[in-house]
Image: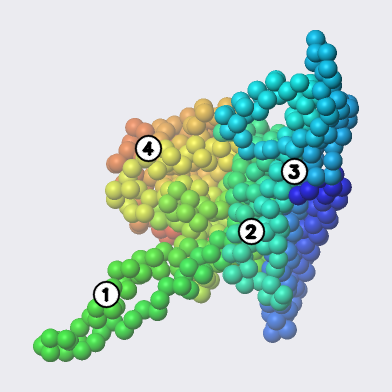
C-alpha cells in the first residue's frame, strides 16, 4: 500500500459498512424469530391440513435463509471492523510519523522517503548538506546496530530524525499492506451461493468463514474484553452487560460456542449462539455421514467352494471395520440434533411456547450436551429443571418420534403443560438439563457415584447462572424446582451440596423420582429445608433401582429419599415402574407440577 492511499484511507467508512451489515444481521434475526415464534407458531395453533403443512415447510426454508443471512452478515460486520481496526492502527502510526517529520522541519515525499534540511552538530563549524532517506522494515539486530551507528556518525543531526520518521512510515505502510493482503480474501470469501436454498454445504462454508474471520480478527477481538476466566455467573453477567452492542455482536459472530455455554448470560443470547452452533454442526455431521461409502454386499459365494455356499465378503468386512462404528455414531448424534430442531419446529403446537437452547455440544463429556428450555426461564414465574438419569445422551434425547415419544425433551414439555394448567396468568419454563456424562449401563457405571460427583458442580453452576440471568432480566427470581430422575437425582443431590449452597435461593424445591440415593442421609442436608424436598417411587423395576442404589451406597447411611428417616415429603405416585413418573395426565406428573407451581396444598402425599 502506498503513502497516498493510506493517508486517504477512512476507517470510519468501513466501520459504517460494518454497522450496516450488523443491522442486516439483526433484521434477519428478527425476521427469523417472527417466522418461528409468531407466524409458524400461529399456524400450528389454529390450522390443520395439507395447505397448512405446505405453508410450514416453505416458512421453514425461509427461516433457514434468514438464519444463514444473520450468521454471514454478522461475520461480515466483524470482518469489516477487524480490517478497519488494523488499518486505523497503521494510519495512526503514519500520522504520528508525518507530524514528527513536519515538526522537525523535514519533508515527507510521495514515495514515503523523508527529506531533511541542512544542519550541523554542536561544535561543528561547517553545516552538513541536506538529504533524503528512505525507510526500511524487517531489520535484524546487526542491521539495526549498523543503522544506529550511521545515525550517530552522520554529520547532519537531522539525518537521524528523518531516518527514524522514514522507518516509522515504512512500518505503517507495511502493516497496512499486510492488513489489506490478509483481509481481502477473507472478505471475498463472505459470499453466499446465488440460490435460495441453504444447504449443508452453505452452513459448513459459514463455519469455515467464521474460523477464517476469527483467526484474522485476532488483533481487533483482542481489544474487546474477554469473559473472566473461570468466572462466576455474576461475573459473566457483569462482563456481558459491560460490552457495547457492537462488541456483543462481534463476539457472538465468532465465539458462539463460548457464549452459548457461559452461565449467567441471558437465555436469548445463549439460545441465539447455540442455534448457530447447532446449524453448523448438523451440516458438518450430515456431510460426513454422506461421505461414508455405501455398505457393500455382505454375503457372496464362498470362495473356497465349500459349505456354506455363501460367506461374508472381504469388502463388507473391510467396510464394517472402517466405517460401521463411525456411521452409527454420526447417525446417533444427528438423530439428537434433529430432535432439537423438531422441538423448535413444534413451537405453537399444543400451545408450546418458544424453545431456548441454553447449551449444546455434540460430544460434551461423552454423551453430548443438551440444555433446552420450554419457555424463557429468565422471565418465568416458575422454573422446573429436569435432570435425566442412566442411559441419557444426545442420541436418545428426543425418544422415538415415530411412536409419539419425545424422550427427555418431551418430559419437560409435559411438565410445562401440567404446570401451566395450574398457573393461569403466570409464565412457566421447564428445562431438560443434560450436561453430565450419564452412566451408560447399570453395572458398574450406575452404581458409581463418580458421574454425579462430576456432574453435580456443573448443575450447581447452571442454577447459579439461571439465577443471575433472572435478576438481570427484571431484578426478581423465579420459583425454581429441580427434578432428578433415577441417577439424575444423585447428580441433583451432589449439586445441592456443592459450595454448601452459598445461595440456596437458586433453587426452592427438589423432587427425586425413582432415586437410588442423593449422597445425603437427611433432606435437611440439601439446603432448602426438609419441607421442600420431595420424593416418589414406583413398583417393579423402580424398586430394583432404588433398593440397588441403597445397597451400593449412592445414599449416605444406606438411606434413599423415599425412606421416612430421610425426612423429606413422599408424594403419591401412580407410575407402573421406573419410567412412568412423567406420563401425561398421571398423578405423578400432577404432583410434580404442583411443586413447580409452588401450590404445595395440591400435592398428594403418600
Tell me the mark number nearer the camera, choosing from 2 and 4: 2
Q: Residue at x 63, y 38 (%)?
A: 138
The residue at which mark 4 appears reads as 555
Q: Which residue is mark 2?
A: 209
Name the quadrant containing residue 158.
Answer: top right
According to the picture, the residue beneath numbered tag 1 turns out to be 317
Q: CA distance from mark 1 to mark 4?
A: 47 Å
Give the crowd class for mark 1: few <14, some 14-19, many >=20 residues within 10 Å: some
Spot occupied by residue 590 in the image (x, y as percentages of width and height): 58, 54
Q: Quadrant of residue 127?
A: top right
Q: Where is 307 relative to 486, above or below?
A: below
Helix, strand or loop at mark 2:
helix
Viewer-proximal residue among 125 and 513: 125
Chain-order first, disc 1 or disc 4: 1
- Name the secondary structure under disc 1: helix
Nearer-the-camera pick, 604 or 595: 595
Q: Secondary structure at mark 4?
A: loop
Relative vertical location of residue 249 with respect to residue 171 in this rendering, above or below: below
Amino acid at each position: 500500500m502506498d503513502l497516498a492511499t493510506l493517508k486517504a484511507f477512512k476507517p470510519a467508512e468501513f466501520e459504517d459498512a460494518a454497522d450496516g451489515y450488523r443491522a442486516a444481521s439483526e433484521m434477519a434475526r428478527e425476521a427469523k424469530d417472527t417466522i418461528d415464534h409468531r407466524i409458524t407458531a400461529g399456524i400450528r395453533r389454529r390450522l390443520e391440513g395439507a395447505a397448512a403443512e405446505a405453508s410450514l415447510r416453505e416458512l421453514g426454508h425461509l427461516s433457514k435463509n434468514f438464519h444463514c443471512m444473520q450468521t454471514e452478515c454478522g461475520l461480515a460486520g466483524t470482518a469489516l471492523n477487524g480490517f478497519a481496526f488494523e488499518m486505523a492502527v497503521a494510519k495512526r502510526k503514519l500520522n504520528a510519523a508525518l507530524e514528527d517529520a513536519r515538526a522537525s522541519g523535514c519533508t515527507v515525499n510521495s514515495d514515503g522517503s523523508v527529506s531533511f534540511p541542512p544542519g550541523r552538530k554542536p561544535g561543528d563549524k561547517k553545516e552538513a548538506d541536506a538529504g533524503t532517506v528512505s525507510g526500511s522494515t524487517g531489520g535484524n539486530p546487526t542491521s539495526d546496530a549498523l543503522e544506529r551507528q550511521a545515525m550517530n556518525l552522520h554529520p547532519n543531526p537531522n539525518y537521524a530524525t528523518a531516518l527514524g520518521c522514514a522507518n516509522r512510515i515504512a512500518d505503517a505502510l507495511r502493516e497496512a499492506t499486510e492488513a489489506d493482503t490478509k483481509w481481502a480474501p477473507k472478505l471475498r470469501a463472505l459470499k453466499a451461493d446465488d440460490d435460495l436454498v441453504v444447504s449443508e454445504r452453505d452452513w459448513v462454508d459459514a463455519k469455515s468463514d467464521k474460523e477464517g474471520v476469527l483467526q484474522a480478527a485476532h488483533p481487533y477481538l483482542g481489544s474487546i474484553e474477554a469473559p473472566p476466566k473461570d468466572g462466576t455467573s455474576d461475573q459473566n453477567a457483569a462482563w456481558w452487560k459491560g460490552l457495547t452492542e457492537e462488541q456483543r455482536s462481534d463476539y457472538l459472530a465468532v465465539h458462539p460456542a463460548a457464549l452459548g455455554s457461559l452461565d449467567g448470560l441471558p437465555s436469548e443470547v445463549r439460545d441465539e449462539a447455540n442455534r448457530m452452533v447447532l446449524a453448523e454442526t448438523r451440516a458438518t455431521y450430515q456431510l460426513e455421514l454422506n461421505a461414508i461409502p455405501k455398505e457393500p454386499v455382505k454375503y457372496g459365494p464362498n470362495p473356497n467352494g465349500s459349505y456354506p455356499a455363501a460367506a461374508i465378503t472381504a469388502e463388507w468386512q473391510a467396510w464394517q471395520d472402517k466405517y460401521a462404528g463411525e456411521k452409527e455414531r454420526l447417525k446417533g448424534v444427528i438423530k439428537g440434533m434433529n430432535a432439537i430442531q423438531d422441538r423448535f419446529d413444534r413451537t405453537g403446537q399444543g400451545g408450546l411456547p418458544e424453545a431456548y437452547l441454553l447449551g449444546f455440544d455434540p460430544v460434551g463429556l461423552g454423551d453430548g450436551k443438551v440444555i433446552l428450555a420450554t419457555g424463557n426461564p429468565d422471565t418465568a414465574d416458575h422454573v422446573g429443571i429436569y435432570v435425566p438419569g442412566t442411559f441419557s445422551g444426545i442420541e436418545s434425547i428426543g425418544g422415538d418420534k415415530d411412536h409419539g415419544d419425545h424422550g427427555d425433551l418431551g418430559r419437560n414439555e409435559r411438565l410445562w403443560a401440567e404446570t401451566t394448567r395450574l398457573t393461569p396468568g403466570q409464565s412457566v419454563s421447564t428445562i431438560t438439563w443434560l450436561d453430565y456424562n450419564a452412566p451408560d449401563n447399570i453395572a458398574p457405571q450406575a452404581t458409581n457415584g463418580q458421574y454425579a460427583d462430576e456432574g453435580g458442580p456443573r448443575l450447581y453452576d447452571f442454577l447459579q447462572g439461571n439465577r443471575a440471568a433472572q435478576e438481570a432480566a427484571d431484578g426478581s427470581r423465579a420459583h425454581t424446582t429441580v427434578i432428578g430422575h433415577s441417577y439424575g437425582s444423585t447428580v441433583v443431590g451432589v449439586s445441592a451440596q456443592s459450595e454448601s449452597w452459598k445461595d440456596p435461593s437458586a433453587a426452592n424445591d427438589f423432587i427425586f423420582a425413582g432415586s437410588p440415593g442423593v449422597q445425603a442421609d437427611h433432606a435437611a442436608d440439601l439446603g432448602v429445608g426438609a419441607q421442600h424436598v420431595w420424593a416418589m417411587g414406583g413398583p417393579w423395576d423402580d424398586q430394583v433401582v432404588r433398593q440397588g442404589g441403597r445397597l451400593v451406597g449412592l445414599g449416605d447411611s444406606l438411606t434413599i429419599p423415599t425412606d421416612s428417616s430421610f425426612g423429606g415429603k413422599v408424594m403419591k405416585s401412580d407410575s407402573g415402574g421406573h419410567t412412568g413418573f412423567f406420563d401425561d395426565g398421571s398423578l405423578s406428573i400432577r404432583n410434580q407440577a404442583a411443586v413447580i407451581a409452588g401450590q404445595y396444598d395440591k400435592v398428594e402425599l403418600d
